[in-house]
Amino acid sequence: MGAAMLSRTADHLYWMARYIERAENMARMLDVTYRMSLVQNAAQSEAALWVPLLHISDTVEDFHKAYDEVTAHNVIYYIAMDSRNLSSIYNCLRAARENAHAVRVAMSSEMWENINSLWLEFQQMDKKLILDSGLSEFCDWVKSRSHLFRGVTYGTMLRDDGFRFTRLGGFIERADDMARLLDVKYHLLLPSASDVGGAVDYYEWSALLRSASAYEAYLKVYRDAVMPLRVAELLVLRHDMPRSLHACMDELTTILDQLTGDAGRECKRLAGEMHSTLHYGRIEDIYRGGLHEFLEAFLRQNNRLGVEIQRTYLNAPIINEPEKSNVGEVQSQG
C-alpha cells in the first residue's frame, strides 16, 4: 500500500472519529441548554438562552440565513436535524458513516456494523417526536451510541497507525468541544462580561457537569457544593477527569509520540506546548487572566494543531478557519 493510500486511509479514520465525537458533543451542548431552559428565569428571553449554542458551534451567521427568528424549536432543529448545518448531528453521523464506508477494510467488522446501524437507526427516528417531547432521550441515545462505538473501536481494532489516527481525531474534537461547552456557560450565558466571577445560578453549573458526565466525579473530588472555580479546575486542569482539556492533551501527546516515521515534529511541539500549560497551570492564575480569554486561546491553539496534523499526515486540503474547522467535508464524500 502506497503512502498516498495510507494517507487517505488515515484521513478517513481521523474524520470518522471526529464526526462521531462532534455528534456526541453537539448532543451534550443541546441537552445542557435544554435543561437550563427548564429553570425559571434562567435567561431574560428565549433567544438569550438559545443563541449561545449557535456561538459555540460557530453557526450564528448561517443560522440567520436559514431562519428569521431564534426560538427553541428552530435552534433544536438546526443543531439536531438540519442538513444545511454542516455541524448538525444529522450531518455528523452521515459524514462519519461515509468516512467509515470508504475504509471498511481498515477497521474491524464490528466497528463497521456499529456505525452503519447507528446511521440506519437515526434515519428511522420520529423527528417530530424528538422536537416535541423526546429531546433528552434523543441526546442520551446519541451519547450512548458514541460510547458504544468507542468501546467497540478500543476492543477490536488493531493497534497500528490506523487506530492511532482514529484516537487522534476523537481527542482533537473532544478538546475543542469541551472548551466551547465550558466557555458558553461561563461567559456567553452570563448577562455581561462584568458578571464573570460573580453570583451564578448553581443549578446551571450542575447541569454543565452532568452534560460532561462529570457530576459524580466533582462530588468525589471536592465533596462540597458546586462552585464555578472548582468546576473550571475539574474540566480544564484535572488530568484524571476523562473529558478535561488536560486529559485530552495527555492522550494527544502520547498518540503523536507513537506515530511511526520522522514527520510530525511541529505537531509534537504544538501539542507539548499546550500540554505543558495545562500540566503546570493553576486555576487561580487562569481566572486572574480571564477564563474566557484562556479558553479562546486554547481553541486557537487546538485548531492550529489540527491544521498541522492535517498538513503533516493527512491527504486533505488545508482550510484555515478561526476556530472550528469543517475540513473533512470534501473527502468524506469520496
Image: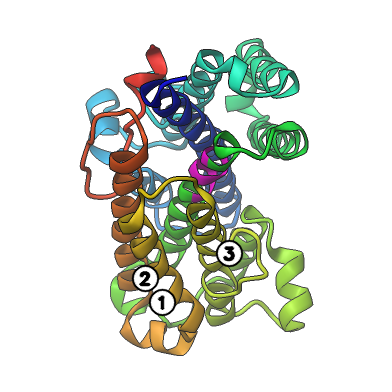
Q: Is residue 267 left or right of residue 6?
A: left
Q: Which mark is residue 247?
A: 3
Is 59 contained in the magenta span?
A: no
User: How many numbered circles are shown?
Assistant: 3
Sequence-wise first label, 2 or 3: 3
Q: Is residue 307 left or right of residue 285?
A: left
Would you place residue 36 above or below residue 326 in this image?
below
Q: Is residue 198 left or right of residue 330?
A: right
Report the amino acid beneath label 3. Answer: Ala
Which stretch is magenta?
165-171
Q: Which mark is residue 277?
A: 1
* Nearer the observer, 145 or 200: 145
Callout 1 crowding tier (Cα within 10 Å): few <14, some 14–19, many ≥20: few
- Point out residue 157 in the picture as x, y percentages from the top left corner: 70, 32
Residue placed under numbered mark 2 in the picture: 273
Report the amino acid beneath label 1. Answer: Thr
Q: Which mark is residue 22?
A: none
Sequence-wise first label, 3 or 1: 3
- The residue that appears at 41% across and 21% down in the rendered structure is 2
- The residue that appears at 43% across and 51% down in the rendered structure is 49
* Nearer the observer, 107 or 18: 107
- Quarter assignment of residue 209: bottom right
- Point out residue 204 in the picture as x, y percentages from the top left corner: 57, 63
- Point out residue 99 in the picture as x, y percentages from the top left corner: 49, 20
Could you tell me how far apart the alpha carbons at marks 3 and 1 are, in whole angstroms?
13 Å
* Nearer the observer, 324 or 252: 252
